[in-house]
Amino acid sequence: MDDQQLLRYGRHILLNEIGIEGQQRLLDAKALLIGLGGLGSPTAMYLASSGVGQLTLCDHDTVDFSNLQRQIIHRTASVGQPKVTSAQAALHDINPEVECIALQLRADAAQLRELAAQADVVVDCSDNFATRYAVNRVCLELRKPLVSGAAIQFDGQVAVFDFRHENAPCYNCLFPEDSQAAELRCATTGVFAPLAGIIGSLQAAETLKVLMGVGRGLSGKLLTVNALDMHIMRSTLSKDPACRACGSFAPSPLQGEGWDGGRKVE
């Protein structure tokens, strides 16, 4: 690190748990972000400001006026632009040292696999189950750590599925793909703006810890937040041996049906 980097990242370096070695790990790291909306905005901004060396930004959408209430990486002047282009410009202003690769696409399984293979960690900031299941399957196949988040109305959640460990549960253990869970969307149900910031910031924190190898974090855990009454709960996730994605009888990491995975409240 040069003098300017030592100054920029000095408050990280002062932390015993991080130091120069931890910060250098961030500078050398590559992260793949899926979704540059309400969760992806604060996540990307904190990863860039913290000095993660390469951020690959993946989102097919364009900035809409209705996004501006919570998607804080975008500006009014960005309306109509691809979200990845708007985010790339904002992140360059925050930290020009970070390489930001903007991909305006809705990645299919093959593209996800190619992108995830080049990353040290995958951060799922998407807003739909189909993408979450697809990302889970690819990360499971490639044994890449996955930081997952969701937020709707006043409720949010963050979980870390670290597939570098053989006994790690997966997203399908928690929310089985064949469970027909109701899918709520911001466009029809609303979302409390600061909640997106809370969950996205937590995703950034977990991503940084995964990359540096510090702290226990939320690996194998689920953190839920209700921003209306500020009730926070952390649960331990169980790997289900019958899970169709990661269990003993799973046909393939690329197939996903499942079972009601259990969790124990701490």
Image (cartoon, helix red, strand yellow):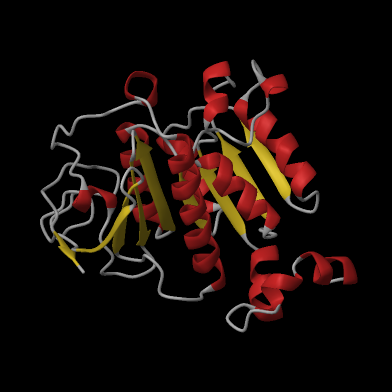
- Give the x, y percent position of residue 204: 53, 55
Residue at (70, 76) in percent of width and height: 13
Q: In front here: 23 or 202?
A: 202
Image height check: is 200 above or below 19?
above
Is residue 232 visible in the rendered image? The answer is: yes
Furthest residue to the bottom?
16
Residue 95 position in % (x across, y down): 77, 51
Q: Residue 120 at x, y = what percent?
A: 54, 59
Q: Nearer the viewer, residue 142 or 189?
A: 189
Q: Kindly identify the residue that appears in the image at 44 percent across and 48 percent down.
A: 199
Residue 60 can be seen, yes or no: no
- Total numbered labels: 0
Taking the view exactly as shown, the residue that stands out farthest to the front is 229
Screen quadrant of the C terminus: bottom left
Compared with 178, 142 (above or below) is: below
189 sits left or right of 30 in the view? left
221 relative to 194 in the view: left or right: left
User: Which residue lies at the image location 19% right of the left edge and 62% below the top edge?
Assistant: 239
Q: Nearer the viewer, residue 238 or 156?
A: 156
Snapshot quadrant of residue 109: top left
Between 207 and 194, the one lying in front of the other is 194
- Residue most toward the right? 3
Place residue 15 in its image quadrant.
bottom right
The N terminus lies in which quarter of the figure? bottom right
Residue 9 position within the rendered picture, expressed as x and y whole percent measured from the top left: 74, 67
